[in-house]
Amino acid sequence: MSDVAVAVTVNGERHELTVPPWETLLECLRDRLGLLGTKKSCDVQVCGACTVLLDEEPVSACTLLAFEARGRRLRTIEGLAEGDDLHPVQEAFVEHGALQCGFCTPGMIMATVALLQENPTPTPDEVKHYMRGNICRCTGYKSILEAILAASRRLAPGAETGRGA
């Protein structure tokens, strides 16, 4: 099988790549674009460590083939902060100590951004249900839940953050 031409916009920057048809989006992001924030973990779409936003929808980069992203917009953890200013979800994770070892954090944050775009004011049960595909091996779920709820208050309509999820 021959390589596939892929044009994709990653964190606002357009990339034109040629990839093998079997290369995952995760491999492409890490190995070709040097975006190491997206983590490789389970390789079977179970743990959420590789969550990225494809056209603002959360996807597992470990099971999506790179060529499937052609012509689409992709956002990774590296694309959330604006200069030195962390995204409000990132700030909430830091403030609530929701980082633990940090391995699952990028996927948790990207899933949280997607959640808050879909449901800006989730209940704790809605957060738990939405985040069920993101596993923290440190089991620090209480602080993660607190951070997500704090971020939702910060980003809720009428809040004065100036930024949307």
Image: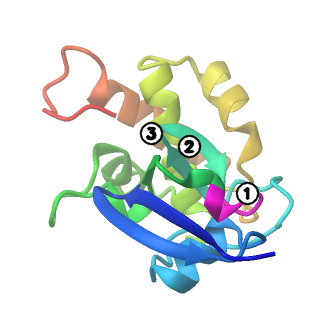
Determine crowd level at label 1: few under 14, some 14-19, many 20+ residues with C-alpha closer than 10 A: few
- Badge 3 marks a residue whose secondary structure is helix
Q: Quadrant where the N terminus lies?
A: bottom right
- Disc 1 residue type? Thr
- Badge 1 marks a residue whose secondary structure is loop
**Percent position of residue 50, x then y:** 64, 61
The residue shown at (52%, 18%) is 122
The residue shown at (51%, 56%) is 98
The residue shown at (53%, 54%) is 70
Q: In terms of image quadrants, where is residue 8?
A: bottom left
Examine the rendering and report whether any part of residue 50 can be seen.
no
> Alpha-carbon distance for marks 3 and 1?
20 Å
**Percent position of residue 2, x then y:** 73, 76
**Percent position of residue 88, x then y:** 29, 44
Quick one: label 1 or label 2, which is nearer the N terminus?
2
Q: Is residue 110 above or below residue 149?
A: below
Which circle, 1 or 2, is nearer the viewer? 2
Q: Which residue is mark 2?
A: 111
In the displayed structure image, the side of residue 160 where residue 79 appears, left or right: right
- Disc 2 residue type? Ala
Q: Which span is picked out in magenta?
A: 61-67
Q: Which residue is mark 3?
A: 113
Q: Which residue is mark 1?
A: 139
Pick the residue in front: 145 or 45: 45
In the displayed structure image, the side of residue 44 where residue 109 appears, left or right: left
> Alpha-carbon distance for marks 3 and 2?
5 Å
